[in-house]
Amino acid sequence: MSASRKIAFVGLGIMGKPMAVNLVKAGHHVTGFDLSPASIDTVIAAGGHGAASIADAVKDAEVVITMVPADPHVEAVILGEGGVLENVQAGTLVIDMSSITPQTSIKVGKAAREKGVRTLDAPVSGGEAGAVEAVLSIMVGGEAADFAEAKPLFDALGTT
């Protein structure tokens, strides 16, 4: 695996914005999307790239990270019309870092597998300060090989 990855980061809020910036600082090619243009501008100012839509953000991504508020947002962003699964290539690794119910993670995983897309469920703990300082605790569920592939990204975001 190359050191630098093409990452789409969807959800640039209180947690997602500093996480995306930390991935840029770690040398990754990060394209951010959020409903707030100011959040996208922050990622661009840090050396990342912006996208006008989820489809635009994820089209060439090797890894897609989602960080949105709750279950309905995850379902809309990943499973919904114009969402991640409609627009990524088979084989892409989708990492949802939102705090959601196991039922939603299972639903997302099943839909992704049907499209040949790999997923990790990786909610975080540590709050905004942990996101800014890259000291989040990340709880990861998924296939061991996918975790191993994502580990350098997790190392750029957290310590545990």
Image (tube, helix red, strand yellow):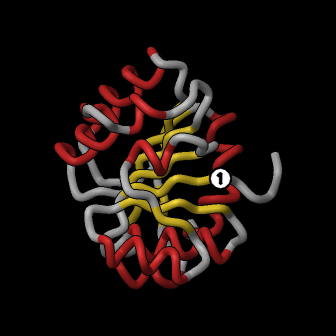
Residue drawn 29% across and 54% down?
99
Query: Image quarter for residue 154?
Result: bottom right
Query: Image quarter for residue 69?
Result: bottom left
Q: Nearer the viewer, residue 94 or 125?
A: 94
Residue 84, can we see it?
Answer: yes
Left or right relative to 45: residue 66? left
Q: Nearer the viewer, residue 43 or 145?
A: 43
Residue drawn 70% across and 44% down?
148
Q: Is residue 130 above or below residue 59?
A: below
Q: Counting other residues with Cα less than 10 Å from the Cα at mark 1, is it few (<14), some (14-19), or many (20 or more)? A: some
Image quadrant in which the C terminus is located: bottom right
Residue 45: percent from left, percent from top: 52, 83
Q: Is residue 28 above or below residue 61?
A: below
Residue 62: percent from left, percent from top: 63, 43
Left or right relative to 28: residue 154? left
Residue drawn 75% across and 59% down?
4
Residue at numbered disc 1: 6
Query: Image quarter for residue 81?
Result: top left
Residue 42: percent from left, percent from top: 44, 80
Residue drawn 29% across and 56% down?
68
Q: Is residue 28 above or below residue 90?
A: below
Secondary structure under the numbered disc 1 in the rendered image: strand
